[in-house]
Image (tube, rainbow, N blue to C red):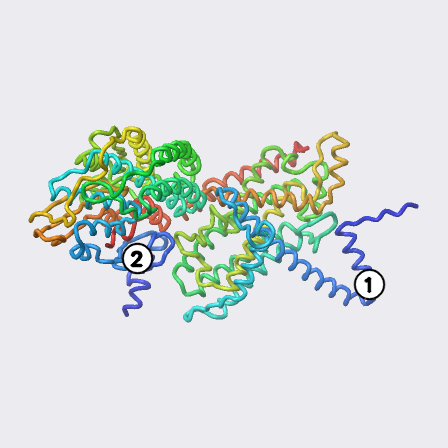
Amino acid sequence: MSLLGEDIVTEDGLFVVNMGPQHPSTHGVLHLKVWLDGETIHKIEPHMGYIHRSIEKMSENLSYRNFIFATSRMDYLAAHINNEACALAVEKGLGIQATPRAKVIRILMGELTRLASHQLWWGCTGLDLGAVSPFFYAFRDREAINDIMEETCGARLTQNYVVPGGVMFDIHPNFQKRTKEAIANFKRNLTDYDKLLTGNVIFENRTKGVGILTKEDAISFGVTGPTARASGLSCDVRKWFPYSGYENVEFDEILATEGDCFARYMCRMAEMRQSVRIIEQLIDNIPEGDFQEKTKAVIKLPKGEFYQRVETPRGELGVFIVSDGAASPYRVKYRSPGFSNLSALSTMAKGGKIGDLVAIMATIDLVIPDIDR
Amino acid sequence: MKTVLTISLSSIAGHIHQWLEKAIGNPTIVYLIDMVLVAVCLLVFLVLLCFFLGWMERKVAAFMQIRLGPNRVGPKGSMQIVADTVKLLFKEGLTPAASDKFLFHLAPMIVVIASMMVCAPLAFAKDFQIFDISIGVLYVSAVSSLGIIGILMAGWSSYNKYSLLGAMRSGAQIVSYELSIGLSLISVVIMVGSLKMSDIVMSQSDGWWIWKGHIPMIISFIIFVVASTAEINRAPFDLTEAEQELTGGFHTEYSGMKFAMFLLSEYINLFVVSAIAATLFLGGWMPLHIGHLQSFNHIMDYIPSSIWFMGKTMFIIFIIMWFRWTFPRLRVDQLLNLEWKYLLPISMVNILLVTLMAIMGWHF
C-alpha cells in the first residue's frame, strides 16, 4: 500500500486522523496522529516540533541575567514560576538567597500565576467539553489577576519580574489592596464555578472513569503535578523540596486516587482553594526590607552543575545549568512538566472515544510551548 | 347592520385571493399565482426570522456569558447578522479538489429545502395555514428526517475525515431520536384522534394539552423538546459538528453561501421544532385562558393569534438556546444510551398511559 494510503486507512482497517497542528482543542500546534477504529481510539502518536524555538540553545548565548526571561515563553501561563526556577538555580550557583521580602513577593506572585493558569484551564476544559459559557466566567476572574500583574510587573502574561537575588522592583502600592479584592471576589465565584460545571450530570458522565492513569503508569511516565496527584502520587515540589519559603506557609497537598479526568479536575479545583489560602496567609505579612539582594552587574557562576526544581501549575519544572565559569551558561536543560505528561496521553486515551481524548487533553492541561521548547 | 373590519392574517390572505380571482378569473392561474406568492412570503419570512434568531442567539449567549453581545451595527447590534450575511455572500466558495462535486453542491440545498418544507402544515395564526394536510403530523415527521440525507451527503462528498465522522454520528443520532419524537407526537395524536394540525389546535380551545393531559403529557413535552434538540443537532447534542472534536463536522469543508445554507437550515429547524412543540402541547395560536376568569380570558382574546403562536414558539426557542449555552456536550455513546436506555422506554410506557387516559376519558 502506498504511503498516502497508509495515512488514510491502515491495512487492518484503522482510520487514521491527524488531529492538529490546527485543531480547536489541541490548544496550539500539537499534532496528534490518531488511529481510530470507528470512534474508538486505537493508538495515539504525538508529533512535535511545530513550535520549537530552541530556547535551551538560545540560553547558552545569553547572560545569566537575561536567559531567565527567555523562559517566560516556555510555559507562558506560568511565566513567573519559570523565571523563578531559573533565578533560584542561578542563586544556588552564586550561593546567595533572595531577601525575605522578595521571597514572599515571589510566592505571592507565583500563587497568583497558578490561580490565573488554573482559571484559564477551567474555562478551556468547559470549552473543550462543549460548554462555552465557563470560558467567559474564567476570563473575568483571570482578568483581575492580570491587572494586578500589570500594575506591579508591567506585563500581564510574560511578567519577567524575577531577577537573581530578588525581584526587579518593589510591589505597587495598590498591590495588597487589589489582591485582597480579587481573592475575595474569586472565593465567591468559585462556588459559581462549581454550580456551572462541576455538578453537571453531563460533565460528570464525560469525565468520571475516563482516561484513567494508574499510579504505576504515572510514575513510569514521569507524570507530575495535579495530573499525577489525581492518581495518588504525592509529588508536590512545594512540599517535598520547599523553595522560596514554602516551608513557612500552611497548605495541603491535594491527592486523589481515582486517576480519571474528574479526579484531575477536582484536584485542580481544590488547588485553587489552596492557592487562595497561601495568598491569604501572606498578603498582610510581607516583610519590610530590600526587594533585591545586591549582585554584581555581570554574574558569573562558578564551574559546576546546578539544578533547581519548582512546582508550576502543570507539574514539576526542572532547570539544570552547567557552568564553565563564563558569563553565560555552558548548557541549560529544562525538564518541562508538559512533555512528560503528554507522554502518558496514549496510555490514558487508548480504548476511549474521540470525545474522551478531548476531555483527557483538557484535564492534563497541555501548554504546547512548554512541551516543545 | 354593523360591518366589522377584521384585520387578521387570514382575512388579508382571503382578500388577496378574492382580488386575484376577480382580476384574472382563470382558477388554475390564480392557484399558481397563489402558490408563488406563498412561497415568496415563506422564504422572506424564514430568512427574516433566521436573522432575528441569529441575533437573538447572540444576545441570549451574551446574557448568559456576562458580556454584551453585538452592539455596534444597527440599533442594539440588530444589523450585525445582515453584515455577516453580506460577508458570507462575498466569500469565496471553496470546493475541495477531491470532493464529489455534484453531491457537495447539492447537500446544502437539500438540507434547506427539507427544513423549509416542514413549514407547510404549521398553523401560524387562526385559519392561517399554507397547507392543512390531513396527515399533518405524519408529514412533519416524515419530511423533517429528509434533512439528514443532506448532512450525510455533505459528510461523504467533502472527502474529509472529520466530515465523514460527523456525518456518521449524525446518521446514528437521527435514526435514534426520530423514535422518541415520533412517540411523543403520537401521544398527542391519540388524545386528539386526528393527524390534522388544525384539529389539534382546535382541540386545545378549552385548555392546552400540557395541562389537559396530566403528567404523561408533560413527560411527552419534555421528551419532545429533548429529542428534537438532538434531532436538529444543537448543543448539548451537537456531535455532528462538535467543534472541539471534529473541527466542524459535516460542514468543515463548506464556506461562503453554502456554509450559510447550513446555518440557515439550523435556524429554520430550530423554529420548526419549537413551532411544532408549541402547536401540539401549548395550544398553537390559542390564547391563554384560565378557568372562569372571564375578564382575563376576554383580554387574552384581544391579543392576535399570530402573536400567541410566535410568543410560544419563541419561549421554546429560548429554552433550547438556554440548553446550548449551559450544558457540556455528550459523548457519542452516551448520546445513544440516553435515547435507547432512557428516552425510548419512558416514551413507550408513556404512550400506554396516554392511551389508557384517552380510553377512560381521564383527561379534562
At 81% from the left and 57% from the top, the residue drawn is B15
Q: Would residue B189 be seen by someone viewing this image from the given angle?
A: no
Residue A237 location in percent, x, y? 20, 37
The crowd level at tag 2 (other Cα within 10 Å; few <14, some 14-19, many 20+) is: some
Q: Are marks 2 and 1 on the same chain?
A: no
Local secondary structure at mark 2: strand
Which image quadrant is residue A51 in? bottom left
- Give the residue furthest to the right: B1
The answer to whether residue B87 shows anywhere in this view is: yes
- Examine the image and state in which quarter residue A183 appears: top left
Mark 2 belongs to chain = A
* Residue found farthest to the left: A303
User: Cα distance, mark 2 to mark 1?
Assistant: 67 Å
Task: Say which mark, if any, is on residue A31.
Answer: 2
Q: Residue at x 71, y 32 (%)?
A: B290
Identify the mark at residue B21; answer none if there is no mark: 1
How far from the left and from the top, in percent, is residue B109? 55, 63
Q: How many marks?
A: 2
Q: Residues within 10 Å of mark 1 (few under 14, many from 20)?
A: some
Mark 1 secondary-structure assignment: helix
Residue in front for this viewpoint, B356 or A331 = A331
Give coordinates of residue A161: x percent, y percent.
27, 44
Q: Nearer the viewer, mark 2 or mark 1?
A: 2
Q: Nearer the viewer, residue A312 or B198?
A: A312
Residue at (53% x, 62% y) in the render: B87
Identified at 62% across, 47% down, the residue is B276
Q: Nearer the viewer, residue B335 or A184?
A: A184
Amino acid found under the numbered disc labelled 1: Glu
Quadrant of the frame with the C terminus of chain B: top right
- Identified by mark 2, the residue type is His
* Residue A93 relative to residue B208: left or right: left
